[in-house]
Amino acid sequence: MQNNEIRNTILDINARWDTAFNAKQPDSVAVLYDDAATVLPAGAAQVTGSKAILQFWTDTIALGIIDHKIELLEAGSDGNLAFQRGLWSAAMVDAQGQRQSFSGNLHVLYRRQADGSWKALTHIWN
């Protein structure tokens, strides 16, 4: 896949991911992951498989995280695997109404599905 093509594909995935997360739709986030995917949250246990990933995003969204945004820095592919290196940012509002912003780095490895679409196989951030 040409770098521009995979870049555009990943930009679309990122937009769908952010939209679903910010709309508090964990099922729409979880569907963007391969059935055998693993999420590797910073400082927490790894989460593997569709059911566990859905529960992880359900619990995470319930924490009140808002304004999530993924910024793509680099994308590439080789055969049935693709990657993105990027940045993420989000915020929370505490009980006193104070907004706290946080951000970090992310890396996502994607696997091409039987239908030609791409889904996250591993997703790690700090």
Image (cartoon, rainbow, N blue to C red):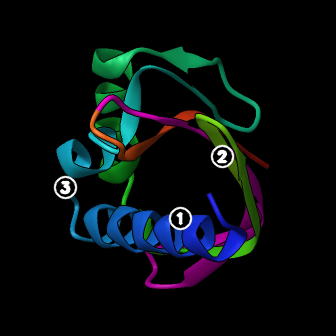
Q: Which mark is residue 10?
A: 1
Magenta segment, principal secondary structure? strand
Question: Which residue extends farthest bottom?
Answer: 98
How many numbered dots are placed on residues in this image?
Answer: 3
The magenta segment is 85-114
**Percent of width and height locating residue 7:** 62, 71
Whichever of callouts 1 and 2 sits on the residue coming sooner in the sequence is: 1
Q: Which mark is residue 82?
A: 2
Task: Reply above or below: 72 against 57.
Answer: below
Magenta stretch containing residue 95, yes or no?
yes
Residue at the (59%, 64%) spot, across then down: 6
Looking at the rendered structure, the kind of residue marked 2 is Ala
Residue at the (33%, 67%) spot, across then down: 16
Secondary structure under tag 3 reads loop
Disc 1 from disc 2: Cα separation? 9 Å
Q: Which sits in the foreground, 53 or 90?
A: 53
The image quarter in which residue 43 lies:
top right
Whichever of callouts 2 and 3 sits on the residue coming sooner in the sequence is: 3
Circle 3 residue: 25
